[in-house]
Structures are given as structure tokens and as C-alpha cells.
Amino acid sequence: NGSLEAIYVPSLYHQALRSLLHLRERNVSHQTRLKNRIKMFLHFYGVNIPANSECRHWSRRFIHELERITFEEPLAKTTFDNCLHEFEENRRNVLRVTRQLRTCVQESKDRHIIKNLLTVPGVGFVTAVTFYAVICDMSRFVSFDKLSTFVGLVPSEHSSGDKAKATSITSRHARKLRYLFIESAWVAVRQDPALLMAYN
């Protein structure tokens, strides 16, 4: 009776691109855990980390400062050095995967799509590639509302009879996209005066 609707099946290339993005996401999450582990180790031994930009970004200079920290017990220094080594190894993994993503994009026939997405205020390389990998083909959405529903940037709705009530944002969403869009919006309102006016 025509009630069945076909689902979109991504190509093998898009599935592989999603897998590479997922690998990067896992490495970034592990990197955050390693940072927290290092900070808690220092807190346990009474060493304070300065709250500045160097601490937020964990630059090479900041890592060198951490390497110069001394402990009364040599074994504690050994443990701390191993934690730093694991963190640096993980950061190299993140950089390697990011370079591989850039290479994939440069060699892709759809690289112009990524280039266009990067012109949007607040959208960086990872956000653009993730959007491209998850959406695949924009034409599969017949309207902007369909795209918003897929991403999850719409309210929930409770219906009872003729009454319909819109509540908070829906729990059904594209996990890899919604939080990236929200973070991009926070950056965009700082870069684009027109978007800031619309936000205010």
C-alpha cells in the first residue's frame, strides 16, 4: 500500500570516513582522560597546575614544564613520567589521524563541499568533515525541517487528543552532529556580528 519508506545507505567511502572520524574521537576522549589523570596525580602529591592558557592547550612548553617537576619519592617521578609519555603518544595518534583525514579530503571528489563548509563562521575542519561524513548527500532531505529533525535541533512534542505541547529539545538526534553544531554556534556569534544580533 506504499507505506514503506526506503532508508539512506551510505557508500563504502562514507562508512570508512566515519570509521576514521570515530577513531579520532576515541583518541581525543582518551586524551582528555589522560589530562585528568595527570592533574589528579599532581593534586594527590600537592603540586598545583597554573590556571592559564598554557594549561588549557597543553602546549609543548607546558609539557616541558611538567617534565621538570620533581617528587620526593623517585618512584612517584617514574610513574608521572610514564603518564606524560602515554599522553604524548596519544597526542601523536590524534595528529596522525587528523593528517590522514586532511589527506582523504584533499583526494576526495567532493573536496569542494568541505571547502564551502569551512567558509561558514564557527565551522572548523573537524566539524566540516563530520557534517559531510554523516549527511553524505544533502538532497536526501526534502526540506530544512527534515534536516533539523535528523540533527536533533527541534523541540520534543507531547500530544494528547487535539492538544499538542512543545517541550525541551528532543532526545533523538545525530550524536556526532548536534553537539558540534552547538559548539560552532558559540564560536560563530563571536565572529559574525549579524549572527550575534540574531542571537541577542
Image (cartoon, helix red, strand yellow):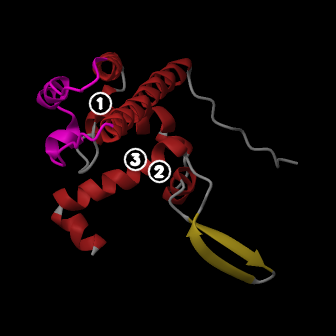
- Viewed as shown, does residue 73 lie left or right of 135? left
Question: Residue 97 colored magenta?
Answer: no
Which residue is painted at 81% across and 81% down in the image? 161
Q: Which residue is mark 3?
A: 180
Q: Name, please, the residue furthest toward the front.
A: 72
Q: Amino acid at mark 3?
A: Leu
Q: Is residue 184 above or below residue 104?
A: below
Q: Which mark is residue 112?
A: 1
What stretch of residues is rendered in magenta?
A: 45-74
- Does residue 32 appear in the picture of this structure? yes
Residue 35 placed where, x, y %? 34, 34
Under mark 2, the amino acid is Arg
Dividing the image into 4 quarters, which one contains the C terminus?
Answer: bottom left
Q: Residues within 10 Å of mark 1 (few under 14, many from 20)?
A: few
- Tag 3 and tag 2, C-beta contact below 8 Å: yes
Question: Cα distance, mark 1 to mark 3?
Answer: 21 Å
In this rendering, the answer to whether 10 lies above or below 154 is above
Label 2 vs label 1, nearer the camera:
2
Mark 3: secondary structure: helix
Marks 2 and 1 close (CB-CB < 8 Å): no
In this view of the protein, which residue sits in the foreground, 170 or 84? 84
Q: How many marks?
A: 3
Q: Specify the label residue 82 is tagged with.
A: none
Q: CA distance from mark 2 to mark 1?
A: 23 Å
* Residue 122 spot, x, y in % from top left: 26, 50
**Residue 178's mark?**
2
Of circles 1 and 3, which is in front? 3
Work out whether mark 1 precedes mark 3 in sequence or the reverse, and give the earlier one: 1
Neighbourhood count class around disc 3 (C-alpha, 10 Å): few under 14, some 14–19, many 20 upward: some
Q: Taking 182 as reference, is 178 left or right?
A: right
